[in-house]
Each structure stands twice: as C-alpha cells, then as structure tokens.
Amino acid sequence: MSQTVFAPWNDPDEKPLIQFRNVTKRFGDFIAIDNLTQDIYAKEFFALLGPSGCGKTTMMRMLAGFEAPTKGQIFIAGQDMARIPPNKRAVNMMFQSYALFPHLSVWDNIAFGLKREGKDKDAIAARVDEMLRLTRLSKFAKRKPHQISGGQRQRVALARSLAKAPKLLLLDEPLGALDKKLRQDTQFELMDIQEKTGTTFVIVTHDQEEAMTVASRVAVMDEGQIIQVATPAQIYEAPNSVYVADFIGDVNIISGRAKPNGEKVAIHWAEGQPDIIGTTATKFEAGQEIHFAIRPEKVAISTEEPADAANKTKGKVLDIAYLGNISTYHVELPTGHVVKAQTANTRRLSRRVITWEDPVWVSWTDTAGVLLER
Amino acid sequence: MRRFILIAVPYLWLVALFLIPFVIVLKISLSDVALARPPYMPQLDFAAGWSGLVSFFAELDFDNFWFLTTDDLYWKAYLSSLQIALVSTVLTLIVGYPIAYAMARAAPEWRPTLLMLVILPFWTSFLIRVYAWMGILANEGLLNQFLLWLGVINTPLTILNTNTAVYIGIVYTYLPFMILPIYSALERMDDSLLEAAEDLGCSRLSAFWLVTIPLSKNGIIAGCFLVFIPVIGEFVIPSLLGGSGTLMIGKVLWEEFFSNRDWPVASAVAVILLLILVIPIILFQRNEQKQREAEG
C-alpha cells in the first residue's frame, strides 16, 4: 500500500501559507532578523529552533502582528500583513507564560476569543465544550487558572488559542514550564491535535529534541538567519554546516584537507594517521579545508582490530557516560582528538568488557559521516 | 502563652487608643450640657460609692440623639458629607487612574522617580498646602490672574469659598491614596495578557476594558475606600476652602464643640458618624481579605 508522504515544500504547484520575503527586523542597532526569506505551507508543523537571541521569537511575534518588519514583507495566505493589527489576523498564539486571564474561569478563558467574534451564545458554548473535550479539561471548566496545575494550564492555553479555529497557530516555547515526562506526553498530544484540527502550527523552541519530535520541518536559526530548513531526519543525517550538526544532537567534528577521488574523498587530518575516507555528492577542491562530521552512534568501538572497516584508528578510553539504555565512550586518539562512540547497552553492566584506560579501536564505514565545507 | 502575649499587644493598643476614647465620647453623648467644667453632667464620682454609680447611670439618656433628629441641619450635613465624599471619590478616581496607569506603563527605570513625585507632597504640612490653594483659587489669586492674562475670562472667577474649591482641595489632597493602590495592582499585571487579548480579537480599547480594568479592580476598590472614608469626616478642607454653603458634618461637629460648647451634642454627632463609617470600613476590610485569598 502506497502512502503519499506529506511534503508540500517539494511540490512546485503548492502555494505556501506563509511567505517571508527579505524580512529584516532591527531593534535599535541590534539586527534580530537579517534579510530572511522562507515559505511555510498549510498543515505543516514548522519548528523554529535556535539558541536564545537567534531571532526565532521575533519571527513568531511578526507573524502574530506584535512586531512589524523593518524591511521586507510577510504574506499570510497571499495577503500582505504589513498594516494588519494582531486582532484582525486569522492567527492565534499560545504564549510562553500561557497568559491566561486570572480573573476568568477556564471556560471563560476559552470563550474569550469567540465572544469577540460576536457569535451567538449556543455556538460559543458548543465550541468551548468541544475544545474542553479535545484537551480533556471538561472537569475543570469552572475553575480559575490559579486553581489548576501547570499541565492543565498549558492545555487551557492551547484550547483558548485553538478555539477560534485559526489558519495558523503559533506556539512560543509551549512546553518550557513542564517537567520532562509531562513534556513528552504533551508533545505527542500536540501532534495529535495538530493532525485532528488540520491547523498549521509554527513552534518556537530551543529544545532540539522537542523540535525533532513534533515538527514536519525544522528551521535551525542563528543570528537572525535560517541556517538550514529540512525534515528532522535530514537535519540530523545531512546537516549542511558544522553549526547545524553541532546544534542538533551529539557529533564528532574532525577538520582536515580534502583529497578528492571520484565519489570518495580522503581527508588528511593528522600527521601519521591514515586519511579518513568519506562519501559525498558535492565537489571538493584538492587541498580545500573540510570538516568531517560523524554521529557517535555511527562510530563502532571494539577491543579487537576490526577487519573490514573503511576507517579505523586506535585510542584509549578517557571517559564513559552511562545513560542506561546507551553508553557514550570518549576515546582519546594519539593525536589528542577525542572521539565519542556510542553503543546500545544490550548486555548487563557486569558483562561488558570495555572500561576506563582500555586501549580500543574506533571504526566507521565510508558512508557513516558527512563532509561539510563550513 | 507566647501567642497570647503577641496577640495582646495589638489588642491593648486598640483598647487604649480606640475603645476607651470611644467609650468616653459615648458617655459624653449620653450626658446633658451644663455650665460647668467640663461642660456636661453627670460626672462620675467614685467617692459616692455604689449609690453614686447608680445615680450616675440613671442620669444618662438618649436626649442628644433625639435632638439630632429634630433639627434638619444634622441629617442634611450627614447627607451632604456623604454626597461630597462620593463625588470627590469619583473625581479622584477619574484623575488618579490615568496617572497610575501612566506610571505603571512607564519605563521601569522611571517608576521610582514617579512614585517619589506622588509621595513628595506629604513632606510638606497638609495645612500649608491647603493655604497655598487659597492663594491659588482666590479672586485675585494666581489662577484668576493667569486666566485674565490669557484673556480667557474678563472678570475673575469665584472659586474660593465654593464647593468647587472643596472638591479641588479634596482631590488634590487624597490623590496619592487613590494612585498608590491602583498603581500597585497595574504594575503587577503581566503585559502578555494584553497581547493575548489582542491576539484573541480585542482592540486596544476593549482589551483595556476586559483585562486591565478587571485586573485592577481590587486596587480601584481599595483606593476608593481610602479616599471615601476619611473625606466623610473631613474638616480642614471645607472650613478653609469651602463657603457658608458648604455643609459637612466635620464642620458641624467643630462648631458644636468649640462655638456652642455643647459637648454632649457634638459627641452624639461623632458617634453617629462613626456608625455611618463602620459600614464602608467593614466592606473595605472584606475587599482586602478577598484580595489576599485570591493571591494566596
């Protein structure tokens, strides 16, 4: 059975819901957004990911209408949003602090936006009840925000922002205040609700795991620019730069000079060490500076010399980080480089053979890593 | 035991500085006026023993309270006091709310300075400030001179010794009591609530009505009581700025006491005033308690 993959960004006929066109936003001398152009499509779950101060929140606030671009244009559903105030946009936002009205009950908080639309009472009540059911809050309808837990408040905020059935829902660090377990549950809940309602979600987060879990596409941002936009898998497996590779997950970066050889590239990275062999589709000049990035779980560790590995080198175990399901070994090479290798702990601790100070082999195939120019 | 001592301190304070003086005033209000020193009868004579005590209580009566109902001056003064207090509370709110709002919206580094400016008038004597208003509002005062110089008016306005002057004086004097509680309510408000209201379809104005006003409600109520309660008994402002037409119970009380030397009637007026004030004071306490519960 063939299932069509949801990837409107690959379809040239698809019209984007949101278009950023050469948008720049300055606060005084500070450039928050630097000449940014980006399309976001309907029904996407689009994550803006980056460290604090990278401009992700500014992008979101421009979509909501709380900030106006200094230069450039933003279109939502083909309409230029320049002079449209927040209350006239078919966009709703879930605030980081939830911003629930403390003087109103849960029910009235959810009804707040609907009442402003001037709908009749029965329609409002029906919609609020629907939202309460969707977020499993029916029992708490009469409570005030300070009488419910943090997780429930977060769901009220979500219900309130969804009540008006916006074309676009903005989520500003929505799960920041929740503990890890609740956060994971809520992430799946969010995806579920996004699928049920068919709303386009744009989420701002600094938590890469969260972005990877929920998003259809992730935009990694730095200093007002989007460095890479791709699906979580592409971002992880094929980062376009050392910055992205380093920001998402754990990675080993080894820099050296390129020696192209057809599809393969040899990297000369240290005197007296065999060149690292990698595979790439991009063309590299001979002698060009090049960065080899490889994820720790793609590096194998063994006490015996592996027989048929494309890349192998000897080292000494410096540190072991035991995480329960997996362990990360920090292996120091004779050159001083430290390579992280990860293995799944399929055996009980007492049966494992590698320990501190042990001489070991680290090895990987010639397709395990990516070659990056910058 | 320690708890008992701790609680006893405020109670002793209340008994010594409120209850005992009140009992004395109540006693005087039940006495009769007399040409004596002090100017009322009967006097409590402990030397006469039990029979003296009995005759003392036998002579107390409610005649003075009865007298207050016979002369319409008194209830008119009470009503007029309530009316002046009500109107000036509303005026103080109208003037004070925008000031408190502007202060709460000002840049954080400005707020201590603005707060200081609101409190600063308290550093000068209240009496001097009221006299200053006489200089400003008089027929040949600063305000009239200024308006004549501008050419807005041809003849000086009569403001001093009218109710207008009383309202100006009261609003000026009690403004900080209105501003401070409203400011503290507004300052605590999270700005993202207003953004959320706008995001959900409110205009700026309706966000103000639906979010800002309800969230500053407790500050408004506290400020109104803090102005209303003392203004009812206000004496200095109406007697200095008001005219013969300004009828306020504080002024009546003063005249009974010092001009007529009728201490018993004056005391009766004071007792009734206290009974009138008990109602808003209890309501005020309720509001404070509700606010604490909502925050706790």
Image (tube, rainbow, N blue to C red):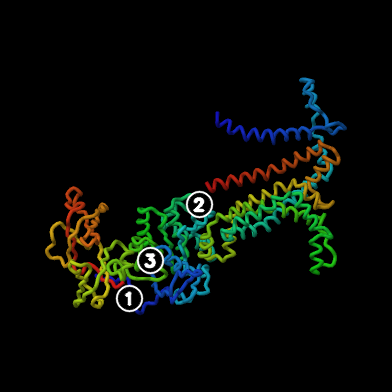
- Give coordinates of residue B294: x percent, y percent: 54, 48
Left or right of A55, for residue B51:
right
- Asked whether residue A120 is in view, the answer is no
Instruction: Report the residue at 18% width, 66% height from top.
Output: A273
Callout 2, which amino acid? Answer: Lys
Callout 3, which amino acid? Answer: Ala
Q: CA distance from mark 2 to mark 3?
A: 31 Å
Instruction: Report the residue at 63% width, 52% height from top.
Output: B180
Mark 1 — residue? A10
Q: Looking at this view, name the residue that lies furthest to the right.
A: B35
Callout 1, which amino acid? Answer: Asn
Mark 2 and mark 3 in contact? Answer it, CB < 8 Å.
no
- Give coordinates of residue A371: x percent, y percent: 26, 71
Left or right of B130, for residue A310:
left
Left or right of A44, for residue B11:
right
In the picture, the disc for residue A144 is 2
Q: Earlier in the sequence, mark 2 or mark 3?
A: 3
Q: CA distance from mark 2 to mark 1?
A: 46 Å
Give the quarter of the figure containing the C terminus of chain A: bottom left
Q: CA distance from mark 3 to mark 1?
A: 18 Å
Helix, strand or loop status at disc 2: loop
- Between marks 2 and 1 in the image, the one whose residue lies nearer the viewer: 1
Mark 3 — residue? A47
